[in-house]
Image: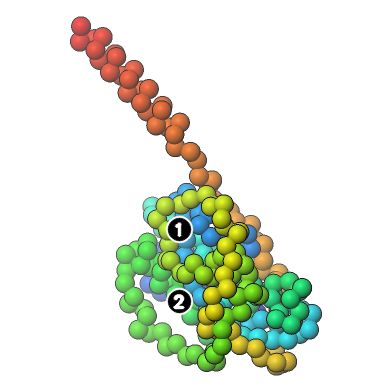
Amino acid sequence: MVLDIRTWEQTFQNLIQEVKPWAKWTLSLDGNLQLDCVALGWKQYQQRAFGWFQCSLCRRHWASAQVHILCHLHWERWTDQGQVVMRLFGQRCQKCSWSQYEMPEFSTESTMMILNKLVQHILKRYYGEGAMQFAKMSVIPEVSLEGSHDAANCEACALGICARGLHGFISEPSVCPPSYLDTESSLPQIGDMYIPNQSMNQSAQAKKAKGTVYKGSVPRRDQKPLIVLGCTLLLIFSLIVTYFKR
Ligand SMILES: [Zn+2]
Ligand SMILES: [Zn+2]
């Protein structure tokens, strides 16, 4: 199944509303989302999923259990409205390494797993609820994958994201560290499998979904001027108090 963000969002909303009928959450894609570059008030969440790729040059297919997914989340407590912005990381064909990063495709089962995990995270993070829905989920492994993760052709590896592991969210939003683009991983990991010329659907729509605008993000401001202003006001206030005491 190719990625149709509207279907994803609908499924995502249904899953949340099963548990939180009044909550309103949206889901969109943003191909420019960056790890640890979280806007003020937003949180980060990552997971790995099982996906398929097809090379647009040689039409070769391969599967990977290490499709990296990065999400930035924001929730407004008073209105119970939330936003999830998602980035899917691509992989390149092993045979045509000059080719572009192909975007992943996901089966219905894999899609449900990704969205279920995301909803579980939201319930835990924002509503303080445990993994009560997990018991209902039956997880069927689609293909048992053997072999190592093809780090040289993984977009998330090239950005140093794969090797850094999956920390659920970071507590302190920050600007991008300078080492962000420099780290490259060559750690072998179990996960990818080469499927020679298997017939599958094309992945044109998955690419269309890239590049949705990331709305609602607020750049982090330097807090020093606020501290200086606060101190000045305090000083003026204490001077006035001393003046009137006399
Ligand atoms: Zn190829
Ligand atoms: Zn990787």
Question: Is disc 1 in contact with disc 2, using a CB cutoff of under 8 Å?
Answer: no
Q: Amino acid at mark 2?
A: Asn
Numbered marks: total: 2
Camera-side residue of 225 and 12: 225
Quarter of the image where the C terminus is located: top left
Place of residue 244 in the rendered image (x, y in percent of width and height, measured from the top left): 24, 9
Q: Secondary structure at mark 1?
A: strand
Residue hosting label 2: 116
Q: From this viewpoint, is residue 20 visible? A: no
Most extreme residue toward the left is: 245
> Residue 140 vs residue 182: left or right?
left
* Upstream in sequence: badge 1 or badge 2: 1
> Residue 96 vs residue 27: left or right?
right
Place of residue 37 in the rendered image (x, y in percent of width and height, measured from the top left): 53, 54
Rendered image: mark on residue 52:
none
Residue 120: image quadrant is bottom left
Q: What residue appears at the point 66 percent right and 91 percent down from the top-left corner?
A: 195
Q: Secondary structure at mark 2?
A: helix
Are there few (<14), some (14-19), or many (20+) residues within 10 Å of tag 1? Answer: many
Camera-side residue of 111 and 10: 111
Vertical order, 202 against 242 (above or below): below
C-alpha gap between disc 1 and disc 2: 18 Å
Rendered image: mark on residue 43:
1
Place of residue 108 in the rendered image (x, y in percent of width and height, measured from the top left): 56, 84
Q: What residue appears at the point 32 percent right and 20 percent down from the top-left corner?
A: 235
Q: From this viewpoint, is residue 133 visible? A: yes
